[in-house]
Image: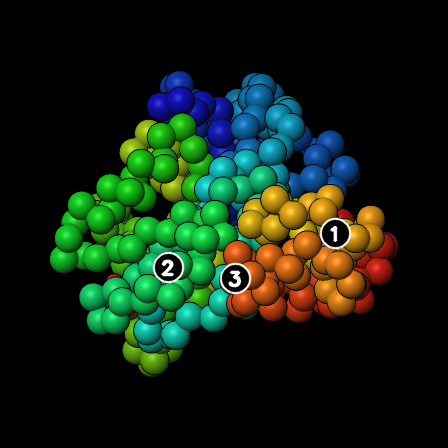
């Protein structure tokens, strides 16, 4: 494994750290609590021995951090979207892709239930936005190869609305897992609403997070992207930066906007642009002191 000394999971104040000598149970040094820093899965750490107890003495600088679910150093976010049941929402997908890009995470769209109904439109929207799209078809097991190819040397997580097929995908990638799948009403009926902890699973030379309840990231205010930075979370806008008539153009209602021109020429997808405007309006209402 290319990874060592990382937190596999945390449960009730204890952390499980993968080392060259196996998994070590440890506690964080008291200093972290005083500094209000919580170790999370994906953290790379330095362990020290205090008597009989291994302790986390140091948390290495993080590439990124998500609070809900708690995970650090994410490289890849597989955004699972089903073509039907539930029907896809480009707004939800765009919120997730922008958060990923903003945090330095590669978003990868995973289209499920294509066996029930294909969706060329969705595929085209994201492919033309420069976001990789993988169609999963469980009747063609090689369709999972494209997902596996992303994993070597990377930390990845799977997210998406309830019922899109996250657990089904994890089970197909890691058959020994056998996470529970099913439709929502069945699960509620059986009273299965267990929240488990985030756990990093070794998968194809990388780490794949099992993040129960990772429906839509924490899309609360804590994850708002500052309005001026939002445009950079849309990779397909990039070629037009610096070409607008006004410097500091927000690409919303300004005259001579190169992004809007590209939209009108069909070079930017309407749903993506609509999401940008909606997210921009949302971000405008967030005061500076509310940003992390
Ligand atoms: N036909 C078809 N059914 C699928 C596919 N992927 C998932 N399903 C079914 O969709 C239902 C929901 O799948 P789950 O894997 O439980 O969905 P989930 O995203 O884990 O849902 P939550 O745990 O509630 O967030 C199950 O009945 C699956 O068998 C697919 O590609 N094709
Ligand atoms: Mg599930
Ligand atoms: Zn503009």
Figure colour scheme: rainbow
Task: Report how far apart the C-alphas of labels 1 and 3 lie in the structure.
Answer: 17 Å
Judge whether residue 213 can be spotted in this image.
Answer: no
Q: Pinpoint residue 182: horizontal percent, then vertical percent.
A: 28, 70
* Residue nearest the observer in this picture, 10 or 111: 111
Mark linked to residue 244: 1
Residue to which mark 3 is pinned: 266
Examine the rendered structure and indicate whether residue 134 appears above or below residue 47.
Answer: below
Mark 3 neighbour class, 10 Å CA radius: few under 14, some 14 to 19, many 20 or more: few
Residue to which mark 2 is pinned: 123
Which is nearer the N-term, disc 1 or disc 2? 2
Is the residue indicated by label 1 positioned so its CB lies within 8 Å of ligand 3? Answer: yes
Q: Pinpoint residue 134: horizontal percent, then vertical percent.
A: 33, 51
Q: Is residue 212 left or right of residue 105?
A: left
Q: Pinpoint residue 125: horizontal percent, then vertical percent.
A: 44, 60
* Residue nearest the observer in this picture, 117 or 10: 117
* Kind of element beneath mark 2: helix
Q: Quadrant of residue 136?
A: bottom left
* Kind of element beneath mark 1: loop
* Kind of element beneath mark 3: loop
Examine the rendered structure and indicate whether residue 236 appears above or below residue 192.
Answer: above
* Residue nearest the observer in this picture, 3 or 134: 134
The answer to whether the residue labelled 3 contacts the one labelled 2, judged by CB atoms less than 8 Å apart, is: no
Is the residue indicated by label 2 positioned so its CB lies within 8 Å of ligand 1? Answer: no
């Amino acid at each position: 494994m290319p990874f060592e000394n990382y937190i596999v999971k945390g449960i009730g104040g204890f952390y499980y750290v993968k080392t060259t000598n196996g998994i070590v149970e440890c506690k964080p040094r008291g200093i972290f609590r005083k500094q209000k820093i919580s170790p999370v899965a994906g953290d790379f750490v330095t362990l020290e021995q205090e008597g009989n107890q291994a302790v986390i003495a140091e948390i290495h600088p993080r590439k990124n951090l998500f609070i809900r679910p708690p995970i650090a150093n994410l490289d890849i976010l597989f955004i699972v979207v089903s073509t039907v049941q539930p029907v896809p929402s480009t707004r939800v997908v765009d919120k997730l892709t922008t958060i990923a890009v903003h945090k330095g995470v590669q978003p990868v769209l995973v289209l499920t239930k294509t066996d029930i109904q294909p969706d060329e439109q969705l595929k085209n929207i994201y492919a033309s936005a420069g976001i990789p799209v993988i169609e999963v078809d469980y009747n063609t097991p090689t369709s999972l190869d494209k997902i596996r190819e992303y994993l070597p040397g990377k930390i990845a997580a799977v997210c998406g609305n309830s019922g899109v097929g996250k657990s089904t995908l994890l089970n197909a990638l890691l058959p020994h897992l056998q996470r529970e799948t099913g439709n929502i009403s069945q699960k509620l009926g059986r009273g299965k609403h267990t929240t488990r902890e985030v756990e990093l699973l070794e998968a194809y030379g990388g780490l794949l997070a099992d993040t129960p309840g990772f429906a839509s990231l924490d899309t609360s205010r804590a994850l708002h992207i500052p309005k001026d930075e939002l445009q950079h979370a849309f990779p397909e806008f990039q070629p037009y930066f610096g070409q607008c008539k006004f410097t500091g153009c927000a690409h919303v209602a300004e005259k001579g906007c190169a992004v809007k021109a590209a939209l009108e020429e069909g070079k930017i997808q309407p749903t993506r642009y609509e999401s940008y405007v909606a997210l921009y309006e949302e971000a405008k209402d967030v005061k500076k002191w509310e940003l992390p």
